[in-house]
Image: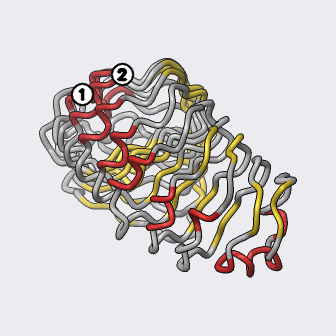
Amino acid sequence: MTELKQLKNISLFDNRFTGVIPQGLGINSSLTLLDFTNNTFRGPIPPNLCFGKKLEKLLLGYNHLEGGIPSQLGKCSTLKRVILKKNNLSGAIPDFVKNINPIFLDLSENGFSGKIPPSLENLGNVTSIDLSMNKLSGFIPPELAKLVNLQGLDLSYNGLEGVLPSQLSNWQRLLKFDASHNLLSGSIPSTFGSLGELSILNLSENNLSGGIPTSLFELKKLSVLQLGGNALGGIIHSAIATASRETLRLLNLSSNGLTGELPAELGKFTFLEELDIAGNNLTGTLRGLDGMHSLIFVNVSHNLFSGPVPVNLMNFINSTPTSFVGNLGLHAL
């Protein structure tokens, strides 16, 4: 295969191929596509896959590949799609050169370590970056704010620390941002309220503090808001009334040390399907949830609620009684 000088496309996906990918692959050809997805290849990624400067799609996900990403791949300005998901790759993510293509980059579920390279800003038209489930550390580079065409960014399940850069509000086309399960601290930037296209925001399981910015409720297309497992504190502001009641489907504010009573406006989210406010210091009654007939999951446990459980929540007492425990003053009608 390595001797085929005119070889451009190799597609061997969804087979049972094993062994090591020939390390000379790419030297004698002008590869544009290499798809070995879902096999059991092991060993390193060949170092010269972009030798002909024409490689566009590198699809090696769901294998057992080891070692690092060859530095030459970071210098490959023709790439449009790179999927190395679910391998045993390790080492640092290489620096990237300028690439004007609308690239899709998925390096998730590996063992990459070190920092997120600021040179990702050179992928000026990148549409999606998935670095989740690795061992990355350090700060989120503010240079990522220059990726104005980004639609999806997943940094979850790493060891990232520091604050969320306020510059990230430049992502005017962003649909999904997931930075959950990291070590992020500081407050949620109020500028995130300008991410007008955002549908999914997941910042759960970090060390964030400083309250829930009311600007988040101005996101008219938000369907999933997950902020559980932080130290946000403060109240659930009545400004939640400004959030779109038609789009919000999941709201998770659990384990944050929230105080005060539930705002009456919360009950107007008649399309909400999942509500988790467990593990806070919320007080008062559950009367504000009276109008929520679309709920398929609710958890109000381990708060300071009192009074009767609304009729529309009574079926949950039978199906998931643990969702109400830890509220000494709460009782069924």
Q: Is residue 298 above or below residue 7?
A: below
Q: Is residue 275 above or below residue 233?
A: below
Count neighbours of disc 1 (C-alpha within 10 A) and say few if under 14, some if 14 to 19, many if 20 or more: many
- Image quadrant assignment for residue 53: top left
Question: Disc 1 marks which amino acid?
Answer: Glu
For residue 253, side relative to residue 175 (left or right): right
Mark 1 vs 2: CB contact within 8 A: yes
Residue 17 location (% of width, % of height): 56, 63
Residue 63 location (% of width, % of height): 56, 54
Q: Nearer the viewer, residue 194 or 310?
A: 310
Question: Disc 2 marks which amino acid?
Answer: Pro
The secondary element bearing badge 2 is classed as loop
Q: Residue furthest left?
A: 100
For residue 192, side relative to residue 316 (left or right): left
Q: Is residue 292 above or below residue 235?
A: below
- Residue under label 1, please give it: 121
Decide if residue 19 is in sight here: yes
Q: Which residue: 33% across, 40% down? A: 215
- Residue under label 2, please give it: 141
Q: Which residue: 61% across, 75% down? A: 296
Q: CA distance from mark 1 to mark 2?
A: 9 Å
Q: Which residue: 79% across, 49% down? A: 302
